[in-house]
Image (spheres, rainbow, N blue to C red):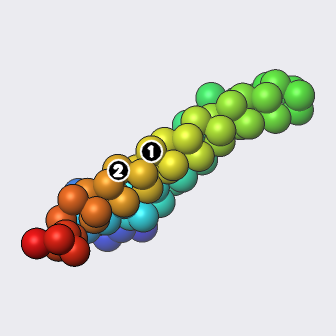
Amino acid sequence: MDNSLTNIPEIIREASKSPLGIFALIIILLFSVSYGFFVSEDGLLKIIAFTMLFIGAILYGVSIYKTAEKKKKENSPQEGD
């Protein structure tokens, strides 16, 4: 366990090199935040809070995907060149 905690900066650095890695970090953060904040709340509040956080993560993932696709199109050679 101690070894994994010392490697956190390296894990974040490697994961941030790709859009899917960033999205994976968001999912891990989503789980940690929702568990920490809502562990002692009743079931309905947990479901509502997790659903809202999950929708936000999905929308952020879509944004990452669209940005990556846009950059890919900008960097690809044009047919008319």
| Amino acid type of the residue that numbered disc 2 sits on in the rendered structure | Thr
The x, y position of residue 3, in whole percent, is 31, 70
Residue at figure coordinates x 65%, y 38% from the top left: 55
Which label belongs to residue 42?
A: none
Q: In this view, does 49 lie to the left or right of 21?
A: right
CA gap between label 1 and label 2 equals 6 Å
Residue 13 can be seen, yes or no: no
Dot 2: few (<14), some (14–19), or many (≥20) neighbours within 10 Å? few
Mark 1–mark 2 CB contact (< 8 Å): yes
Image quarter of the C terminus? bottom left
Which secondary structure, mark 2?
helix
Q: Give above or below for 47 relative to 58.
A: above
Q: Residue drawn 74% across and 36% down?
A: 51
Q: What residue type is labelled 1?
A: Ser
Where is residue 18? Give x, y as percent.
31, 65
Dot 1 corresponds to which residue? Answer: 63
Disc 1, SS: helix
- Tell me if mark 1 has few (under 14), some (14-19) or many (20+) residues whose alpha carbon lies within 10 angstroms of its own: few
Q: In the image, which disc is placed on residue 67?
A: 2
